[in-house]
Amino acid sequence: MIDAAAELFRARGYHGVGLAEILSESGAPKGSFYHHFPQGKDELALAVIENGGRFVSKFINEVFESARNAEDAVSRFTSGVAYAFKESGFSQGCPITSILLELTPKDEAVRSAANNAFETWIEKMVAHSLSLEQGKVSRQALDKAFRAFLIAIEGGWIVARATQTVAPIMMAHEIFASTLKMELGRR
Amino acid sequence: MIDAAAELFRARGYHGVGLAEILSESGAPKGSFYHHFPQGKDELALAVIENGGRFVSKFINEVFESARNAEDAVSRFTSGVAYAFKESGFSQGCPITSILLELTPKDEAVRSAANNAFETWIEKMVAHSLSLEQGKVSRQALDKAFRAFLIAIEGGWIVARATQTVAPIMMAHEIFASTLKMELGRR
Amino acid sequence: MIDAAAELFRARGYHGVGLAEILSESGAPKGSFYHHFPQGKDELALAVIENGGRFVSKFINEVFESARNAEDAVSRFTSGVAYAFKESGFSQGCPITSILLELTPKDEAVRSAANNAFETWIEKMVAHSLSLEQGKVSRQALDKAFRAFLIAIEGGWIVARATQTVAPIMMAHEIFASTLKMELGRR
Amino acid sequence: MIDAAAELFRARGYHGVGLAEILSESGAPKGSFYHHFPQGKDELALAVIENGGRFVSKFINEVFESARNAEDAVSRFTSGVAYAFKESGFSQGCPITSILLELTPKDEAVRSAANNAFETWIEKMVAHSLSLEQGKVSRQALDKAFRAFLIAIEGGWIVARATQTVAPIMMAHEIFASTLKMELGRR
DNA sequence: AATGAATGAGCTTTCATTCAT
DNA sequence: AATGAATGAAAGCTCATTCAT
């Protein structure tokens, strides 16, 4: 059910998709939804964000596991996002963004979950990189570079919706590399 | 009416805002809306995108008019976006993104208008910069750097929603600078 | 404008067609409608009924002009209705019926106009026939037969909508003939 | 709900009656309507037609059950329709006609349902009559006569709206009789 | 624990009409 | 005399949610 919701939200946004469609898509019976999500659609949104956060965290682990260095991992990550975007028919963006951009002032829980996911990703990528690069790069520089990378992935995902190509997403790799180089040159 | 719609879409997304609220916010009576927008909310969305595109284009002209060089203009632009975001209570993102991310497969007109806006911004920024830098920088390098800048602004706008700070937006400036430097070092 | 309205009403009913479509179909400017029909759509309905009534009256004159006897005229009339129905793609019924069946209790004017049209048709057909048949048939018998004929035309027009053939309309001829024969046998 | 809709459609036509009125008349709450009729008003129209078709079919059974011969049944049927029309304040016509005359080109389902109802009525009346008349009348003659009868009932129902009397409806009986007599004389 | 039925507020849109020019 | 602009009531429909079982 969460997966079905995520797929739909990513393509048409949180308010752009009705509960009925989510349920029919997931095959779940209509009435049982509020059994699992007593708070309704809001709670589902939260679950989609947290699930998306975990999914990307796992993907981060994967790309770093077989990587020789940070840039290698970044390259694989970027290609993975681009590939998935292409596979979706150039239609599915970031699950977190798809909900975050339709926030109601009161949705503090959603905002905070989104922020947690973003911060967790950065922390994981920094930690993995530190361990790979063995002190050759400062934590500070990596933190900056991965923040730029996150921004570039999110921005690229958006611009790619407009161009219907993966090129904007692919730029995230270069943005990471140039930001890291610039930071290293700063010492 | 377009302005009212833009403000609301930017905060809560296209489908997150009802026509009734837009009209009550803009003071326009309910019935007269379809006189000006016979195609309804879709057409309003298009108008918001085109209006937003023009608004940013003008803002680009402004920041370049009083700029000594490209980076100076980029700095002013970035600060302007960050300031506006802060003024909105950290709630209003890019008008184009707010609609683009809730596309229905059929909304080709919206996608194309969004793409036009993005491309126009890049072209304008490149042209202004070429004239400012007087041959010191290649068109190719500028094009790349401004594409990175656009991505960074859009991505920053999103991440800033999560952090409730302007920091992610401000990174766009650095991303532009490091991308340009990297491109120039490529020769 | 009246003709455009009649065409549309006949196919989709009085309330099934909006003023906007009528005006766009007739090419008339939107605002000038209430100049000619201060009472609005109701008045247009009345005009359609009266116009339809006159049109059929003229057609009655035509079919009787070149007819040797009443049945001959009835045959031509029936074929004419059937032909027009076929030409319309089996979609357009009687203009008067199309409005009469959607009466609001208050629409006494419409009902009375419809009744006038029907009565006028019968009177005309009876008078023509009396003059053709030269006393061989009583006014009373003709009146009865033409009332049956009117009913058969109207009923046939309806059933023909269901069958998408002209057969039900064509039966009006036979119904006239058998009713007249029966009446004549009554003496 | 179907009954309430039928009453209102019969008096003012399909498009002449809003969903709100049907629901308030039937006591059903607005929202639950689409639970039972997911396709909306179109589906309700179909239900009204089918229900009307069944209702008349039952009435046909009734009038034939206690009839000595076909004409007797036809007489009762005609009187029944006339009585109901009078009881409704000379306002309610055939439920099927009330929808059939406002067809949109696409409403093939409605047209087909209407045609089915009409054909079923004729078949039933023919079958009942054959069994009553025990071979004294051919199926072919009965078929013709009942087709004329159907047309006459439908046409009479319409003209009766104009006259505000039952006389046009009552003629259906005579039209049946004279058509049958004519057919029998044909042998 | 699980669910189809039921719900009314709200959705976008169309309606016939009136108004200002 | 003629008209595009303006209007709000009402249209059909979908929404997220609650209820009875």
Image (cartoon, coloured by chain):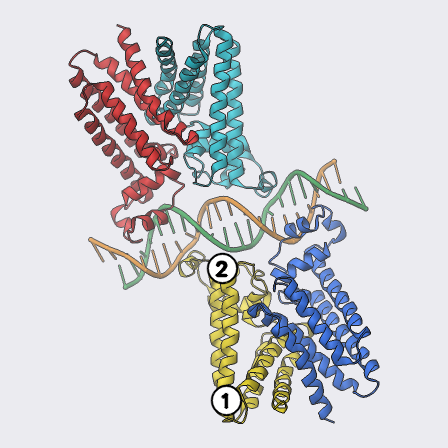
Chain colours: A red, B cyan, C blue, D yellow, E orange, F green
Residue assigned mark 2: D41
**Residue A56 place in picture, x, y as percent:** 25, 31
Residue at image location 63% in from the left, 60% down from the top: C14
Observer-side mark, 2 or 1, equals 1
Q: Is residue D82 visible?
A: no
Image vertical order of residue D28 relative to residue A107, above or below: below
**Residue F4 place in picture, x, y as percent:** 68, 39
**Residue A172 place in picture, x, y as percent:** 33, 22
Image vertical order of residue C163 relative to residue A93, above or below: below
* Disc 1, SS: helix
**Residue A136 place in picture, x, y as percent:** 18, 11
Say few, some or many: other residues with alpha carbon within 10 Å of mark 2 (under 14 / 14 to 19 / 20 or more): some
Q: Residue D130 carries which label?
A: 1
Q: Which mark is residue C124?
A: none
Task: Examine the image and state in which quarter residue A147 appears.
Answer: top left
Chain letter of mark 2 equals D
Chain letter of mark 1 equals D
Q: Nearer the viewer, residue B3 or D51?
A: D51
Going by the numbered disc 2, the residue's amino acid type is: Lys
- Spatial CA distance of label 2 from label 1 is 39 Å
Going by the numbered disc 1, the residue's amino acid type is: Leu
Do marks 2 and 1 share a chain?
Answer: yes
Q: In this view, does D146 lie to the left or right of C73?
A: left
Q: Is residue D148 visible?
A: yes
Task: Examine the image and state in which quarter residue B94 appears.
Answer: top left
* Disc 2, SS: helix
Image vertical order of residue C90 relative to residue B139, above or below: below
Residue at image location 59% in from the left, 72% down from the top: C159
